[in-house]
Image: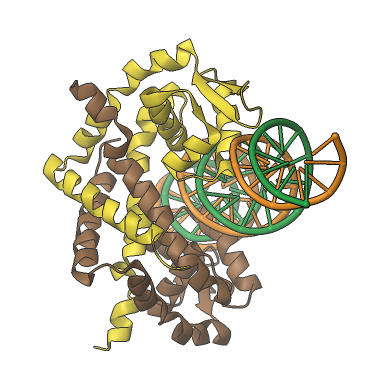
Chain colours: A brown, B yellow, C orange, D green
Amino acid sequence: MSDVTDVLSLDRQVCFALAVASRAVIGVYRPLLQPMGLTHPQYLVMLALWERAPLSVKELSKLLQLDPGTLSPLLKRLEAIGYVRRQRDSQDERVLLVTLTGKGRELRSEAERIPSSVVERLGMPLEELQELHRSLTRVIAAANGAPH
Amino acid sequence: MSDVTDVLSLDRQVCFALAVASRAVIGVYRPLLQPMGLTHPQYLVMLALWERAPLSVKELSKLLQLDPGTLSPLLKRLEAIGYVRRQRDSQDERVLLVTLTGKGRELRSEAERIPSSVVERLGMPLEELQELHRSLTRVIAAANGAPH
DNA sequence: CAACAATGGTTTGTGCACCAATTATCATAC
DNA sequence: GTATGATAATTGGTGCACAAACCATTGTTG
């Protein structure tokens, strides 16, 4: 009955639930992404590029909240499979501009089926997913604003 | 105004929010866990063990929803820093029982300060976190029950 | 009891994810 | 115009995470 036990109890840890939920939902995407040869993080990069390419590594890093050190090899893999081109900005040779190839642009129509397919497989009411999304957005803001 | 654009739009992807939120919240734990020499997944294993050690790899895998192949090296690291002991079950030499060392048990009192510290740093009302937790639990169930 | 399947862990390979250190380019200040 | 500092990306190191292959032990069945 101690609060301490309560607090440490595994299944009450929001953090644990977050980690498990994240992995579980990514697991639902996996078989859908596999035919296109994409992992989930790669898919997120493609989403960002479909919305507004070209993007620099810096911009992608900010958008996806991912370390440049994580993106660097990931982008090379996307280039290796032919979805993306990496080239230095001629205005500023420090920045690397990531653009879509024709193959990368074409992939979009195939990808458009994914979100609805995921929602269908989850079998949850859309309203609930939207509420979850709002809730997650608040947590992200809280975590990013946390001290230290 | 097409629904398709809407659906692919990055910031509406629950999955993206989940991944970012998970990483962001783990980032709040990081500085709190660092003094004890624990990573977040290692912390989750310790939580499980504090609740009910000994546990086999199989049981840990089920509790934490983690692959045995992920746990195997993680547990060796926990053993290397002296929080845990790994020994085969004499009844069934296939199963590996993970138990706490004295040092591992002592760590618990230090860890008990973490959850409240995280909540404080997040600065979110407890009620909202609990609602998020319920919502995440439903998503986890949905994802685990998803076809394929 | 000897083949056989099932079970529990480990290993290997690929790909994130983060951190710290490094490199190259650009911008400023002498 | 050369030192200085800032910025953008890459590299290297550690540690998840998952899949597939592998191995030892146990359980079962002919």
Depicted B121 relative to depicted A100: above or below: above
Corner quadrant of residue A28: bottom left
The residue sitting at 35% across, 35% down in the picture is B29
Looking at the image, which residue sits at the far top?
Answer: B102
Along the line of sight, the residue nearer the viewer: A69 or B140: B140
Depicted B138 relative to depicted A129: above or below: above
Along the line of sight, the residue nearer the viewer: A59 or D16: D16
User: Where does residue B131 sit, x and y in percent of width and height?
Assistant: 17, 49
The residue sitting at 47% across, 25% down in the picture is B37
The residue sitting at 54% across, 46% down in the picture is B67
Corner quadrant of residue D3: top right
User: Where does residue B38 sit, x and y in percent of width and height?
Assistant: 46, 28
Corner quadrant of residue A15: top left
Left or right placement of residue C12 versus residue B106 in this view: right
User: Where does residue B127 sit, x and y in percent of width and height?
Assistant: 12, 43
Along the line of sight, the residue nearer the viewer: B20 or A115: A115
User: Where does residue B45 sit, x and y in percent of width and height?
Assistant: 45, 32
Numbered circles on residues, count: 0
Left or right placement of residue B69 versus residue B123 in this view: right
- Whether residue B95 is visible, yes or no, is yes
Along the line of sight, the residue nearer the viewer: C9 or A132: C9
- Whether residue A91 is visible, yes or no, is no
Depicted B27 relative to depicted A54: above or below: above
Location of the C terminus of chain A by quadrant is top left
Location of the N terminus of chain A by quadrant is top left
